[in-house]
Image (tube, rainbow, N blue to C red):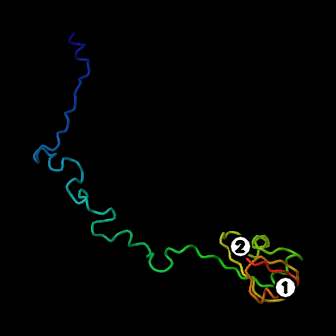
């Protein structure tokens, strides 16, 4: 019978750590609870406070002054009347047609195109874009029309 008892494993429970029972216990004072009694334990320390070191926000470029809250600028394209000679007789010229021809970019949603006079227009076209007065006269002289926007 003694042999069986000698072969059994001994069962030992670890004693629980008793925290907060005085400085002499080795686990007193803050009782292993981290930073409970220092600056981070206080209510009114801002999240961005870094202990007197310069704030991280100050390292970024300033976003002050004009244009901070403005909407993105519209891209302005200027076309000349001589550029319209590549289209066929009787075509309707609008932004979509200019994008297909590669005269203006395709990516911008807020596209602004204006036609001004430079060179001679040799085709009869219908223009559905903002146009200068002198360019309008050139289009009408060539037999085309300008549709007001």
Q: Where is residue 86 drawn, in percent x and y?
A: 85, 78
How many labels sit on residues? 2
For marks 2 and 1, the one nearer the N-term is: 2
Q: Disc 1 marks which residue?
A: 140
Badge number at residue 103: none
5 sits left or right of 25 in the view? right
Taking the view exactly as shown, the residue that stands out farthest to the top is 1
Nearest the camera: 35 or 78? 78
Q: Disc 2 marks which residue?
A: 105
35 sits left or right of 147 in the view? left
Q: Where is residue 19 drawn, in percent x and y?
A: 17, 42
**Quadrant of the drawing holding the C terminus:** bottom right
Q: Residue at x 25, y 13 (%)?
A: 4
- In terms of image quadrants, where is residue 119? bottom right
Q: Residue at x 24, y 56 (%)?
A: 41
Nearest the camera: 49 or 10? 49
The answer to whether 22 is drawn above or below residue 42 in the figure is above
Q: Where is residue 145 drawn, in percent x and y?
A: 83, 80
């Amino acid at each position: 019978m003694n042999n069986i008892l000698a072969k059994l494993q001994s069962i030992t429970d670890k004693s629980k750590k008793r925290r907060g029972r005085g400085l002499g216990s080795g686990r007193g004072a803050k009782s292993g609870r981290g930073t409970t009694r220092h600056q981070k334990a206080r209510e009114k320390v801002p999240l961005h406070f870094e202990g007197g070191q310069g704030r991280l926000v100050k390292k970024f470029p300033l976003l002050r002054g004009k244009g901070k809250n403005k909407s993105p600028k519209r891209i302005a394209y200027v076309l000349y009347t001589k550029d319209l000679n590549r289209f066929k007789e009787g075509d309707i010229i609008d932004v979509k047609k200019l994008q297909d021809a590669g005269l203006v970019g395709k990516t911008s949603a807020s596209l602004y195109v204006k036609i001004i006079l430079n060179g001679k227009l040799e085709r009869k076209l219908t223009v559905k874009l903002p146009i200068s007065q002198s360019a309008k006269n050139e289009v009408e002289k060539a037999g085309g029309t300008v549709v007001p926007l």
